[in-house]
Every structure is written in C-alpha cells, then in structure tokens.
Image: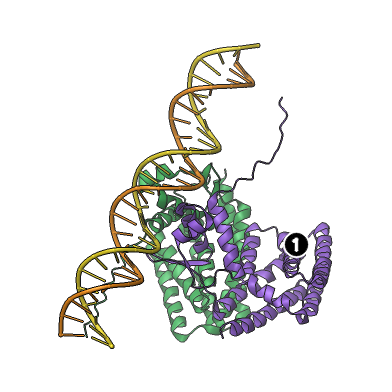
Chain colours: A purple, B green, C yellow, D orange
Amino acid sequence: MTEHLELNMDAYLPLRDVVFNTLREAILKGDLVAGERLMELQLASKLGVSRTPIREAIRMLEQEGLAITIPRKGAIVAGMTEKDMQDVLQIREALEELSVQVACDKITDGEIEQLRKNMKNFEHSLKSGDLKRMAQADVEFHDVIYQATDNPKLISMLNNLREQMYRYRVEYLKNPENHQQLLSEHEAIYRGILAKDKAGVTDKIRRHISNQVDVVKHMIREQEK
Amino acid sequence: MTEHLELNMDAYLPLRDVVFNTLREAILKGDLVAGERLMELQLASKLGVSRTPIREAIRMLEQEGLAITIPRKGAIVAGMTEKDMQDVLQIREALEELSVQVACDKITDGEIEQLRKNMKNFEHSLKSGDLKRMAQADVEFHDVIYQATDNPKLISMLNNLREQMYRYRVEYLKNPENHQQLLSEHEAIYRGILAKDKAGVTDKIRRHISNQVDVVKHMIREQEK
DNA sequence: TATATGTATTTTGTATACAATGTTTGACTC
DNA sequence: GAGTCAAACATTGTATACAAAATACATATA
C-alpha cells in the first residue's frame, strides 16, 4: 500500500471566497463605509479578477446583510443606524443568554479550563495596548462559551452578530477606562459558569451586552455628527 | 404639473432571484432532497437560463445554509439531521420567546385585532382540509407577533428558522389529532399577549415550540427508516 | 434659468467561451 | 479478478462578450 502523504494542498480557495472575505472585512472594519457603491468592474480591476467572482461575492454579502443591491442599479454597503444596532443587540442578548444557559449544562472541564486561560489572556492583552490582540482575546473568551453549546448554527449566528459591530468593539477597547469593567464582567461570567449558576450567569451576560448597547449608541451618535 | 401615474412596473426580477426562490422552495418542500447534487448546467437547461444566474443563486442558498458547496466538486442540497433540527429549534425557542416578550410591550391595538382575526382564520382553515391554507394561516398568525416586535432583523431570522422546517409543519398539520392542541395553544398565546402577561405567554410559546421538537423528532425518525 | 430631450457613457444582467480540475471508463498488466 | 493507468468526458472556475438599463452630459427650447 502506498504511503499517504497529507501535504494539505488546501491552499486553494475559489476567488469568490477570497473576494468575499476581503470585502467582508473591509466593511466590518469600516474601510468601506455605508452607502459606498460596490461597482463590479472597479472592484474587479482593483482586486485583479474578473467580474464573475465579484458578483458571486456580492450575492454572499447581500445574504449576510452587509450589502444591499437594487436590481439594475448595483450594490451598496449596508448601513447600520442606531436602530439597526439596537435590533441586532436585542437578538444577540437573547442568543447570548441561551448560549450561557446551555453552556452551564454542557461545558466540559477542559472547556472550563480553556475559558479560564482565555480570560487571563484577555487580561494580559489589555496591558499590551495592542487593540487587535485585545479584540482577538475577547473573541476567544466568548468563543469557548459558544463552542460549549455544541450548536453549530447558534455558534455561527452569534459570530455573525458579533462581527457586525466589530468596529465599535475596537473603539470601545481603545478607552482604558472600560478595561476594568470588561474584566470584572468576564470574571463574573466565568465564575457563574464554573458554579453552573444559570440564573446568575444569565444576568451577568445580560448586563455585559446591555453595556455594549449603551456604548454603541453613544458612538453612533458621535459618528453621526 | 403632470399627473403621476404609478403603473407599478415592478414586474422585473433578476433571474438569479427567480432561480433562488425556485430552488429554495424546492428544497424546503422536499422536492430536492438532501444530498442531491445541484449541477449548474443541468439546472440551467431545466430552468431555461444560463449558468450565471444559477451560480449566483447557489451562492445565496449556500449562505442560508440550504446548500453546501465543495470547491471544484459542486453543490449539494444540505441535509437536516435530527440534531440539526434540534439545534434550530433551540434557537427558535429563544427568539420566539424574545418576540412575544417584545410584542407584549409594543403591540398595537390594530395588531391585536389582526392577531385575533388570524387566529380565527386558522381555526376555519383547519376545517377546510386544505393543507396549504392551514400552513399559510398558521404563518399569518405568528407573523403578526413577529411584526409587532418592530425588529426587521429578528423577523427575517424567525421567518428563516421557521421555513427550515416547512415540510415537517405540513406533515404535522396532516394529522387532525393535532388540530385541537394547536388551536388551544394559539388561543393561549393570544390571550397572554392581550393581557400583556409576559411570563405567561413566554411559557406558552415555549410549550408551543417544544411540542414541535417532539413532533419533528418523531418524523425524522420515521423518515430515516 | 429651468426644463426637456437626445446621445454617449457607464453599469448591471445574462450568456458563452475557455481553462482547470474531477470523474468515469475501459484497456492493460499482474 | 483486482489493481493501475490513460484517455475521454463531465463539471466547476474564471474571463469575456454582448444586451439592456441607468446615468451623465450636452444641447435645444420655452
């Protein structure tokens, strides 16, 4: 029998996915601002591909709510009003509550240990001053909880909802005044899950999200000036 | 000034949307079964269009979780295992609870009246024996609640989650034994919203969904034989 | 000046062509 | 007969061509 060398030749990604990821990130980070037109030919030449993968990527963005296309007029980057953000956070609150409740039931010892590690890592990242690292560490903390739900659909929905406000999260982290609060919220959530205290942890996560509502509201108002 | 005649020339829909809707319905109704390949050329000739709109529609289906594509191999209809269905219903329960709670706060008198009408209409539809009409009336009842949330994102998510189990809903309605229970559940939900009794109506909707979990589980087991 | 109107340009919608990869089949070897 | 290989075929990936609609712009007209 021939030896099977797994060289992982998975370097290949269809161009549509490359384009999709590129545009997605650009939108979430705010490099492409709301209302901006997504013109196929222009994007195609900028990214060095033909219109076909661009069009397919736009269809995907559309489905995720990141772009809006008007037939025969073209696509634009979807905007997020304060109302939109409130709506998203309302949904997120419900699903985050669900996820911690399920996590209380299903989380494994290994995952609890991982949660503790990621909480510590987030704490360290705050001292580093590296915004990207903070955001990443924050994501990783919450991800452990998501993963513990063992519900892939829920995980992807939560990730999606969270990414929708990436730019505001980063802004939030810029202000060191917020760090202590974030940390203690994470700790409270961790302790709640450790104790499998569903009611308590539900309350903690609700506050964690509701704080974000306030922050995001404030930022949107600033931005709209 | 010239009179403005709104002739509503909106008859036009891009082919990609026509294809998307067609395939989507076919999948949700079970006409296209899980695992079935979605071959571009074949679909194109069957629907009388070129590959381009087919490909774009597949990208959209993919994003909704209704199709899975493996690069350079093609797309297949996504399957739903019992686990998948449980996962979806877990999410749906959380969001349905959210929606009735918000509805208790925000619902208008007009919407309450509409809810009553749609409840009655559902009752009548049960006597008609017309499955499609029943399913439609059921949808319309719940839609009033969704609309009352005034959260478009939530509405579209709930509609999407609901549609994912369309085929099972229809099966469920086929059995007249279930009719009385459905009706009394609807009535309980209606009364709860009328009384703005959040806790009560949350409990009702939870049971309404959890009944579906049982039914769907049972059906999937039947089907897998 | 303000408003039509006609034409050129841009942009999207759809179809098709070509390239690259995957799959099948059948001859060939052992 | 099982396994290998290569050629033929099928299918997806990407680019391009052509059609149709929207837009921009210049001109004419009141």
Rendered location of residue B105, percent (x, y): 56, 84
Picture residue at 58% right of the left edge, 65% below the top: A26
Task: In the rendered view, tell whether residue A120 sits above or below residue C22.
Answer: below
**A111 to the left or right of B90:** right
Task: In the rendered view, tell whether residue B189 sits above or below residue B91.
Answer: below
Rendered location of residue B216, percent (x, y): 57, 56
Question: On the image, which quarter does residue D30 sit in?
Answer: bottom left
Q: How many marks?
A: 1
Q: Nearer the viewer, residue B196 or C10?
A: C10
Picture residue at 68% right of the left edge, 70% below the top: A96
> Is residue B211 shown to the viewer in this render?
no
The quadrant of the picture occupied by the C terminus of chain A is bottom right
Residue identified by numbered label 1: A144
The quadrant of the picture occupied by the N terminus of chain A is top right
Task: In the rendered view, tell whether residue A154 sits above or below residue A213.
Answer: above
Question: On the image, which quarter does residue A29 sit in?
Answer: bottom right
Picture residue at 80% right of the left edge, 59% below the top: A111
**D25 to the left or right of A103:** left
Rendered location of residue B131, percent (x, y): 41, 59
Picture residue at 71% right of the left edge, 63% below the top: A146
**Chain letter behind tag 1:** A
> Is residue B55 shown to the viewer in this render?
yes
Assign a secondary structure to mark 1: helix
